[in-house]
Amino acid sequence: MGRIFFAGDTHGNFAHIIQAVQEHRPAAVVFLGDLQPQRPLEQELQPILDLTEIWWIHGNHDTDSDSDHDNLFQSALADRNLHGRVVEIAGVRIAGLGGVFRGQVWMPPGEIQHETTEAYIAHCGKGNRWRGGLPRKHRSSIFPADYASLVGERAEILVTHEAPTSHPHGFDAIDELARSLGAARLFHGHHHDRLDYSAHRERLGFEAYGVGFCGITDQDGRVIVAGEFDEARQYRQGEIL
């Protein structure tokens, strides 16, 4: 099993990823959403494509504009989207759930408004469709069908954009998904901060790690690159929180 890096929200910044891969040579890098590449993703990461595997889930900002969407979802790395599936990466089974909960679709624990993308398309009206299908914004919404596709699967690690309840703005639904997968660890982005979740391990039944803005954490929870908004007291370089 090789080393796996989990990259927090980059928002178009990839220099630290390239530098870390060139220095540490991980087997794979998994992006946790809100990549927002300014060019097709394979162009942003061209210096390291021969050095490591690239995988990703999307975040809410990856559908902010046509270019945000297309530079990710229509890139040469589009097939490396982990959303709604389990993939063995560097010998580890990793499940992915990209996007965010939105009330127009599903805001757990509230009622489900639309189970599937097809149901939402039928509801929203032709004038609200984007490129003839789902409105662009909702291409980063979590639909219950996406979530359900992972329930009953098995994975050692779950990656999400939304946070579990160890974060002040996390969701029980994320906790439940991790437990249904039998995941030992969860890594998430979205909130741009890294918190010490160690006190929650027993309650959750798994280890959880938030990865900060432009931060990198490895599969053991060790900080490789501190997020730009991380507080120094929250971690020690190279040590598990």
Image (tube, rainbow, N blue to C red):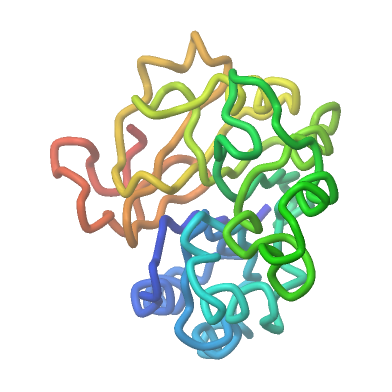
Q: Is residue 67 rendered to the left or right of residue 191?
A: right
Q: Position of residue 192 (x, y in %)?
A: 32, 49
Q: Nearer the viewer, residue 101 or 45?
A: 101
Q: Residue at x 51, y 88 (%)?
A: 39
User: From where the camera sits, is residue 6 visible?
Assistant: yes
Q: Is residue 162 rendered to the left or right of residue 139?
A: left
Q: How many marks?
A: 0
Q: Residue at x 44, y 69 (%)?
A: 24
Q: Quadrant of residue 221?
A: top left
Q: Which quadrant would the C terminus be assigned to in this image?
A: top left
Q: Please tell me whether residue 21 is drawn above or below residue 232 in the rendered image.
A: below
Q: Position of residue 175 (x, y in %)?
A: 58, 22
Q: Please tell me whether residue 135 is drawn above or below residue 169 in the rendered image.
A: below
Q: Residue at x 21, y 47 (%)?
A: 230
User: From where the camera sits, is residue 85 visible?
Assistant: no
Q: Please tell me whether residue 94 is drawn above or below residue 63 in the rendered image.
A: above
Q: Quadrant of residue 112?
A: top right
Q: Is residue 229 rendered to the left or right of residue 198?
A: left
Q: Nearer the viewer, residue 155 or 177?
A: 177
Q: Nearer the viewer, residue 111 or 141?
A: 111
Q: Residue at x 35, y 44 (%)?
A: 191
Q: Position of residue 88 (x, y in %)?
A: 78, 52
Q: Please tell me whether residue 62 is drawn above or below residue 49 in the rendered image.
A: above
Q: Residue furthest top?
A: 203
Q: Position of residue 127 (x, y in %)?
A: 69, 66
